[in-house]
Amino acid sequence: MGNERQRKLGFVMSYAGIFVSSIIGIAFTPYMILKLGKIEYGLYQVLYAAIGYVAMLDFGLGSTLTRYILKYRSSNEQDKVDSVVSISVKIYCAIGLFVMLIISILTANLDVIFSETINGENLRYAQKMFMVMGATTAISLVSHAMSGIQTASEKHAVVKGVYILRHLLRVALISVLLQMDIGAMSVVMADFAVTFALLLFDVLYCKIGLKTAIFRGKWNNQLAKSLLSFSFYAFLQIMITQTNNGLDRVLLGRMSTLEVAALYGVVMQLHSLFISTGGVISGITMPRITNVVFSNATREELTDCCVQYSRYQFHISAPLIGGFAVLGQAFASLWVPEYDSRAVWICVLLIVSPQILESVEGTIFNVMKAKNMQKMRSLLLLGVMVVHIGMAIALISVNDIYGPALATCISFIIGNTILSNIYYHKKVGINMVRYFKGIFKGILPTLVISIAIGVFINYIPVGGWLGFMVKGFLYVLVYGVLTLLIGLNKTEKALLVRLRKKLLKR
């Protein structure tokens, strides 16, 4: 199967995965809250956010592995490809053991870390959950290496197929275990079982299907040092992302109540649905962008390549954030009536809105990875992260619902939008003026006009799920018509015509 066909299939499978995970998340979250209750669901969210900080020990080796495999394959150095794979897997195994050591220490001190929310009543239960979560995290690290190998081979359909299978198996197993009345431990045990089973599949596929020498490559000290040096800045990116995503729930677990932490669990559930659409284009196009960089493309050629793929991403992200701005509060009131729908709506908008541009710019991240230029941006965002932590602590003490969301919003605008784009323009080799003109042309006016019309759609006097679906359909119709009229450029219109002809022919 050709690489182009693999990319197309991977694109389709990626959005099929997002559709499946979104439907499961929307349908299953109210059921989990019902079965667990606000307090136990809040406990799970606090522990889940905390375990994310341990998962940062991934060190970004998965994407690093992809980059180095592509680099040495392009120069036909198979011995170095084998060494890169073997070194990475061995490092991951060592990290897994270290993770379990860290988890053991943290488990013994959960009552100290979360003194306000985890106490004598739920301490032992929380400790058992945390240990199983840690074991899941440890074994999942090796699967990151397998995904890196599959991505480098452009087996996007396999990677995304496993992603879909993971969600389906997880929800099926959780449903069975929840009926046994073992509470949040059902979710934790299901995650462990599914992660272990799919790791076995990944290893066998890479070894037999891709004929990858997982352990046979020779250890090379210089290569190992190069891998770790490159991945260190990828690790900083992961650490910053995890801090931004998990900080609110961890701080609320220390400074507020499990009920408020549970509300933020709902907010971050919606956040994950938005952000999951952001990595699809950049993930599939990483090999393509890497090849363009290695071919010594000019500044304009590189910018235009990034614009092309970024526009595809913006076409996907813009109607989602616009639709939520118009109908988000109505959706939250129907979806999780136990929580303040206005608070959920406002917090999601504060957290997600500044991250939309970052997701659109995912192709620029691939340029930086290919050029090994992550260092300065990572250090820059590390400083912003420290400011974010201090701001969140201060604002939580003022308002424990809107404070942390506002802190996340402000820090993202400063670091991930303003300062990062200055760096892309001056150092990475992307003409950001040309880039923004390219991605905003047509799409931004479509978004603004559709939101303005959506405000009036919201006044249609129909309530309940039926009213929500009617209003949602009208918003989608308005956005679709505006996209056809002013949103698409010539290349995208030609692509749409070719796609239409192909579908009609079939």
Image (cartoon, grey):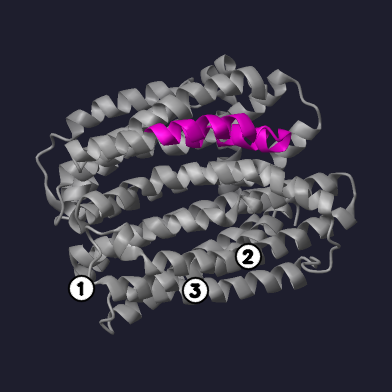
Question: Residue furthest toward the left?
Answer: 461
Q: Label 2 neighbourhood size at 10 Å, few (<14), some (14-19), many (20+)?
A: many
Front tag of 2 and 3 = 2
Residue 374 magenta: yes
Q: Which residue has dot 3 on it?
A: 194
The residue located at (76%, 60%) in the rendering is 87
Amino acid type assigned to the residue bearing label 2 in the image: Val
Q: Position of residue 95 (x, y in %)?
A: 61, 62
Amino acid type assigned to the residue bearing label 3 in the image: Val
Secondary element under disc 3, as helix, strand or loop, is helix
Q: Which residue has dot 1 on it?
A: 121
Circles 2, 1 touching at the beta carbon (< 8 Å): no
Q: Residue 301's mark? A: none
Q: Is the magenta region chiefly helix, strand or loop?
A: helix
Disc 2/disc 3 C-alpha distance (Å) = 14 Å
Q: Look at the picture and state if 96 lies above or below 279.
A: below
The residue located at (73%, 48%) in the rendering is 227
Question: Where are the magenta residues, as a range?
Answer: 358-387
Q: Position of residue 292 (x, y in %)?
A: 75, 33
Q: Which residue has dot 2 on it?
A: 142
